[in-house]
Amino acid sequence: MSIISMVIFFLTVLLVYGGANLYVGHRLYRGLKLWLPSLKPWGFVVIYGAAALSFVVSSAPLPAPAGKFFTWLGAYWLGIFVYLFLCFAAADVVLWIGKLTGLVPKPAPSPVRLGAWVIAVACAIALSGYGFRNATQIKEVQYRIDLEDGKLDAPMKIVMVSDLHLGAVGSESRIGELVRRINAMEPDLIAMPGDIFNDDFGRIQNPERIRELFRQLKATHGVYASLGNHDGGPTFEQMVAFLRDSNITLLMDEVTVADGRLAVAGRLDPSPIRGFGGLKRQDISHLLAAVDPNLPLIVLDHTPTKLWQYGPGVDLILSGHTHRGQIFPGSLITNLIYEVDYGHYQRTPGSPHVIVTSGAGTWGPPMRVGTYNEIVEIILE
């Protein structure tokens, strides 16, 4: 993407975000004014403006205390804002239909407008509260994949966790539980297909604790990781060193063989945010050329796009990235964008199996509505 395209993209996002905030702020103020006639507009603008700008400000290079505060405020506000927007929009549509059909007088009486406002705000609060609570839960899902006869001498258990987003709000609190539950599954191999970090290694609150927890991961044939779009930027070298010091085998467009039983390849993400220190994603053909065709080949590729590039030489592709939309109605959008945004998929009987996880963490708001953080257990047979 060129610099001009990036500027246009970010300006468009800011305009859309700003317009949506003007709508939500206006609706909030009008409702509060019905409750509190003495409410001054400038006081509301200051408080609402601070909340609305917090998500933008959180990405700026700020001193540690301020950066932590705005990151926290911005993440929680973004989630609440989404549902305020949706619930206010739904209330306005219902009122418009009511006026159109004559069920609601024109103009709508104050009690009707206030009632609609209260219901919209209550629904937004309920959905947000549920989403924040649900994001602290971790679900386990299992898939069984039948490989070509003779490729495996015995069944193998792979455990996959993706999209930890270390450094995001709430990201570090679940790592201990993840490690305990993964180890309890007694995996033969652990796969981490990207977005282990959240753009900036320096945002991790306690990297030493996370490193020690990662070192506790136990798998017969080891722990393997690839890089996602959030695993780059100025602190890229720190991320790489951290993973390697955590006894995790990082594959950057590389392939390795796990104890002679299974070939594992890790791809660089095609669209890293601020780059991988000059490294570029290579064509898949050079990886396939280095693999014994008699061995099963698993590819860790963070973003599940252009799946047609993988032919019969690949047995299984493990991806994340989509979060399955994370919060409803995001799942409707990811389902339209990706060939597969969640679960097990196989384009044709001879194509590679693909498993896309919703991830074990959250990006932006620490919220899950209609989706779950998950650990994926895969039985290869």
Image: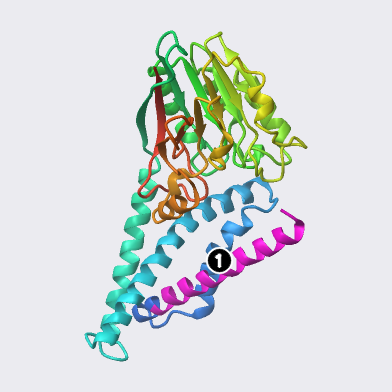
Is 357 a magenta residue? no
In the rendered view, tell whether residue 337 sits above or below residue 343. below
Q: Nearer the viewer, residue 132 or 139?
A: 139
Residue at x-position 48% and y-position 45%: 339
Q: Decide: few, some or many residues near mark 1? Use Cα within 10 Å; few <14, some 14-19, many ≥20.
A: some
Q: Quadrant of the C terminus?
A: top left
Q: Is residue 87 left or right of residue 173?
A: left
Secondary structure, magenta segment, majority class? helix
In the rendered view, tell whether residue 131 sits above or below residue 164. below
Q: Check disc 1 and report the residue beneath it.
A: 17
Q: Nearer the viewer, residue 7 or 51?
A: 7
Q: Quadrant of residue 150?
A: top left
Residue type of the residue flagged with mark 1: Tyr
Q: Nearer the viewer, residue 75 or 16?
A: 16
Residue 271 picture location, percent across and down: 65, 44
Residue 33 picture location, percent across and down: 39, 80
Residue 71 picture location, percent across and down: 57, 50
Q: How is the image coloured?
A: rainbow
Per the rendered image, the range of residues in magenta is 1-30
